[in-house]
Amino acid sequence: MGHKKKGNGHKQKKNNGNRSKKTNEDRLKNEKKVDTKIIVGVIIAAIVLVAIGAFVYYQYSSQNDTEYEDTVIDETGDNVIINMAELEDGEFHYYEYEGKSSTIKFFALIDDEGEVHTAFDACEVCYHAKKGYEQSGDEARCRNCGQKFSVKGIGTENKGGGCWPGYLPHTIDGSRIIIKTEDLETGSHFF
């Protein structure tokens, strides 16, 4: 009988050794799972940070840092006057008008054929970004969506429904471009 007990005790030790071995294997598996979870977490966090960085860069890299000139208003207070000689360089000239509810921004230029173009520095689609337009040669480019337009089309009404410099009518009186303040006020919602 004593022999059986010894044998059972020996088997017990062997089973304890197997349990100990199995416990070590389980612990190693769990540690590997934890390590994998940490690595995956770090990778996800890195991806999120890169995405946030790209979003912030995109939002602020094309920010409208344009310098706007003050407008000259005629003696009646009903019209903004721009001297055509200011626009002879063919470049966008940016202006601000202090409207009733906001500062209204617009630009004007004379193209290479001598045609005058005026438009709000915003559009119905992208105005919420408050980035406006910039000139690149004979094209205007939206600083928000990147859409490009021939400067010769600026100053016409948007018939396509997409991004387009906001229509701002004007008249010409000799060497002066005249924009009615009431027309400027129609674009106040952009700003």
Image (cartoon, rainbow, N blue to C red):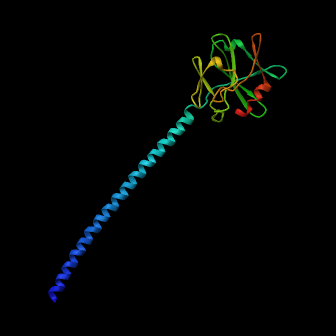
Dividing the picture into quadrants, the one containing residue 68 is top right
Residue 74 screen position, x and y as percent: 81, 19
- The answer to whether residue 188 is left or right of residue 88 is right
Question: From this viewpoint, is residue 191 visible?
Answer: no
Residue 181 screen position, x and y as percent: 79, 25
Question: From this viewpoint, is residue 166 visible?
Answer: yes
Residue closer to the observer: 184 or 145: 145
- The answer to whether residue 81 is left or right of residue 49 is right
From the image, which quarter does the N terminus lie in? bottom left
- The answer to whether residue 63 is left or right of residue 171 is left
Q: Residue at x 50, y 40 (%)?
A: 53
Answer above or below: position of 51 versus 114. Answer: below
Q: Residue at x 20, y 78 (%)?
A: 11
Q: Residue at x 77, y 34 (%)?
A: 101
Answer above or below: position of 60 versus 5. Answer: above
Residue 100 screen position, x and y as percent: 79, 32
Residue closer to the observer: 149 or 160: 160
